[in-house]
Image: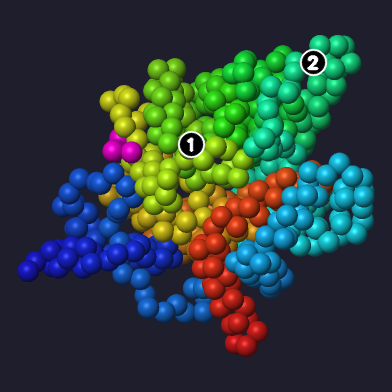
Amino acid sequence: MLKSQKVMCLLHRVKSPTSIVSQYRQLNTQSLRKVSSTASAHEATLTPPATPSPSARSGHQRPLSLLPFPSLLRSYAITALSTYPLLLSPSLRILSYVAKSSSAFLNPDRNPIFHHLLKKTFYAQFCAGETVEEVDKTVKGLKDMGYKGVILGHGKEIVLEKDNNIESYSAPSTDSEVQGAETVVQLWKEGNLQTVEMAEDGDFVALKFSGAGCDAMRQLAANLPPSKAIEEATTEICELAKARGVRLLFDAEQDVVQRGIDIWTIKFQSRYNKTTAGQATVYGTYQAYRHSTPVTLSRHLAIAQQQGFTLGVKLVRGAYMASDPRHLFWSTKEDTDKAYDGIAAALIRREWNSVLKPSEAKIPEVAFVLASHNQETVRKATALRKEQDDKGEPKIDMAYGQLMGMADEVSCELVMAAKAERGLARSEKRECMGPKAYKYAVWGSVGECLKYLVRRAEENRDAVTRAKGTRAALGAELGRRIWG
C-alpha cells in the first residue's frame, strides 16, 4: 500500500479531532499534505483531516497551566457548584430574585454586604471590573497570558420574562417621557463610547441594543427604524470604533426583538463594512440553535453581495432558552451542533453546503468570530484553518471567542497553539499568528451586570455535561499545582 494510502486509512480511524497545540506542532508533516492534495470534496460539516493526539502531555503543554492560581481556584469552585443541581438551583433562584428585585436592600450597588459577596464570587469570575482601572487590570492580565485581545461589553441590558408583553412598552407621548427616553439612550451611548475608549486596536466591543431602554425595545419589536436619538448614538459609537481600529459586535437578543436587531445591524454594516474587502467594523450575531438561522444568514450574505460590503458574522449557539419559546429551537443538542458546525465550515471555506444553502454563486467576503465553548467544534475549525495554511489557500479574517470565566480549557489551548505557531513561524522566518483567541468580559457596576450574571448561571445549568468536563480538567490542574 502506498504511503499516502496508509496515512489516509489512519486518518479515517480517528474519531475525534486532535488537540489544537498538537495540530500546530505538526505543521511540517509531508504525509498530510499529500493526503490533502488527493482528498475528496469537503463534507457539509467541519470534517477536516485530523492527526492522532499524543497520549500524554508534558508539563509545559497543559493549557490550564496558563491560569493564575487564584483564577484557577475560583473557576473550579464555581464550576463545581454548577455541576451539582442541589447547590446550583437555589443559588440561581437567589441570584435571579436579587436581579429582579426593586428593593434598595437587595440592590448590590446600595447594599455593601451583597456587593462584596457577589463581587468576590460570580462577578469576579465573569466580569472585567466596575471602573476603568479595574477593567484595564483585567484586560492586561488576559493579554499577558497570551490572548490576542478582548471582547468588552457594558453590562446594562433588559431581559424580558416569558410572561412579559412587549406591547406594554408604549411610545413616549409627553415631553417628560420623550426626555426620559432620550436620557436613557444618552447614558447607553456614553457607556458604549467609554467601552470603545477602553478597548485597543484589534479588540472587539459588544453592543446590546436593549441597553438603550424600553423605547428601543419597542422600536425593535415593531421592526421600526431606529429613532433619531438611537441612530445618532449608534453612529457616534461606530465612528469612534472605526477611528480606533475597534470592531463592534451587535449582540443577538430575545426573539421578540431579534428581527429588528437584524434590520438595524445590516443598516450599519452596509455603512461601515465597505472600506476594506474581507474586513468588518460591525458584526451581527447569529444563534445556531434557532431553526431560522441558516436561512437568515444566507439572506444577509446575499444582501452583502448585492450592496458590496463585508458581512461580519459572530456565530453562537444561543443563550435565551430560558426566556424564548421552545419551538424556535432545534429539538436536540446534536441538531444544534450540526447547524453550528455546518455554518462554520461554509463560512471558513466560503463554500455553500447542505446547512448553509446557496443564494449566490459563491459566499461573498466575510469576517468571522467563532464564539464557542465546544472543544470539538473549535478543534475542527483550527484543523480546517491549518489545512488551508498547508495548501496555501486564502483565509478569511477569523477570531475565536469564549466568555471570561468559562471554557478556559478551550481558550488556553487556543492561546498555546498560537504561541507554538508563532515560534515555528519565527524559526522558518515567516509571518503567521496562529489562532486568534479572545475573551468576552462585561464591565459595569455589580447591579448593572446582574442580569448578565443570571444568564451565565443559567447557561452553566443548561450545559451540565460540558461543565463536568471543565470541572475535571480544572480539578486535575489544581491537583498538579497543590500536590505536584
Q: How many labels were placed on the picture?
A: 2
Q: Disc 2 or disc 1, which is closer to the eye?
A: 1
Judge whether 382 appears above or below 224 on screen. Answer: below
Q: Which residue is mark 1?
A: 328
Identified at 56% across, 44% down, the residue is 321
Circle 1: residue type: Leu
Is 205 on the left-hand or right-hand side of 299? right
- The answer to which of 299 and 370 lies nearer the viewer is 299
Judge whether 453 appears above or below 84 on screen. Answer: above
The image quadrant that residue 194 belongs to is top right
Residue 152 rendering spot, x and y as whole percentages: 67, 44
Identified at 38% across, 47% down, the residue is 335
Q: Secondary structure at mark 2?
A: loop
- The answer to which of 25 and 255 lies nearer the viewer is 255
Is 334 on the left-hand or right-hand side of 444? left
Identified at 72% across, 37% down, the residue is 157
Rendered-image quadrant of the N terminus: bottom left
